[in-house]
Amino acid sequence: MPAPLVSVITPCLNASAYIGDCLDSVLAQSLDDWEHIIVDDGSTDDSFAIAADRASGDKRIRLYRHENNRGVGAARNHALRSARGRYIAFLDADDLWLSEKLSVQIGMMRENNWAFSFTNYGIIDARGNDIKDHVNIPSCMRYRDMLRNTAIGCLTVVIDSSQVMNISMPEESIARQDYVLWCRIMKSGFDAHGIDRVLAKYRVLDSSRSRNKLDAARRMWIFYRRYEYLNPVLSSWYFLNYVVNAFRKYY
């Protein structure tokens, strides 16, 4: 088969309640030139079986499995190594896209020759009920902006792999894997362009790591010190900004 225009990267762990809806939101895209690469990361529920059932009816869906849980970074990297599309998009197994997501975003990226873009998104609960209809995003993010503000939702990101080389994430469990990648791309000279249109829905679960604010804060501090090598004073300054912006995002 010819290479698709877009590769959709989905790590999955015990998401049997949501993986079907996630897949359906990709299948419903008005732009249909894509492949959906799902890596089941050692699920102990029916996630793999549900994904396999969908994959059996559509050759664009490619499914891999880790026998043991290796972490979301390893699952995403497995999918990234298998990706054939020019554009790389990210969608976790419990999140959703609106049907025009890829057509709008890829269209704007091609028109403006953007290497990195992200969009607005809404927040839903475990049952799909709206918690917040949109999260405000800036029109452009640069490296120092990212140190202060986690405004980029992973489920909204698309990267042009013909411009950005070596797309991969750290695999340590303590890392903010996506955040490390965004900053690495920005440090190499690319800005992230925001599209102020709700094109995705982020699902907040009681078990979500991001729901655990203390754990999220701890990982941000580790990011400043271990991955960006910032001194304690700078780390404290950026961390304070991060806390304020995180509060604004959800409340």
Image (cartoon, rainbow, N blue to C red):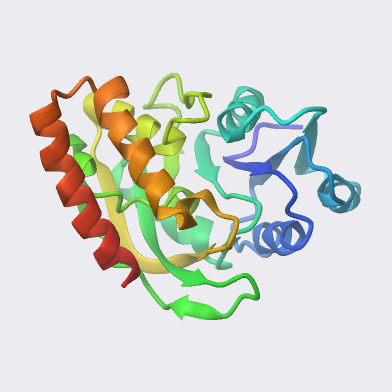
Which of the 4 image quarters holds residue 197? bottom left
Which of the 4 image quarters holds residue 224? top left
With respect to residue 67, does 39 lie above or below? Answer: below
Q: Can residue 115 be seen in this view?
A: no
Q: Nearer the viewer, residue 62 or 224?
A: 224
Q: Residue at x 47, y 78 (%)?
A: 131
Where is residue 156? Give x, y as percent: 45, 53
With respect to residue 233, does 5 lie above or below? Answer: below
Classify residue 113 as left or right of residue 59: left
Where is residue 225? Give x, y as percent: 25, 25
Q: Nearer the viewer, residue 110 or 73?
A: 73
The quarter of the rendered structure image containing the N terminus is top right
Figure label count: 0
Q: Residue at x 20, y 35 (%)?
A: 143
Classify residue 101 as left or right of residue 110: right
The quarter of the rendered structure image containing the C terminus is bottom left
Classify residue 88 as left or right of residue 234: right
Q: Which residue is drawn at 71% across and 40% down?
A: 38
Q: Can residue 150 be seen in this view?
A: yes
With respect to residue 251, does 224 lie above or below? Answer: above
Q: Residue at the front extreme?
A: 214
Q: Which residue is drawn at 46% across and 65% down?
A: 199
Where is residue 164? Give x, y as percent: 38, 26
Where is residue 196? Give x, y as percent: 30, 65
Which of the 4 image quarters holds residue 81? top right
Q: Which of 110 and 204 is in front in this view?
A: 204
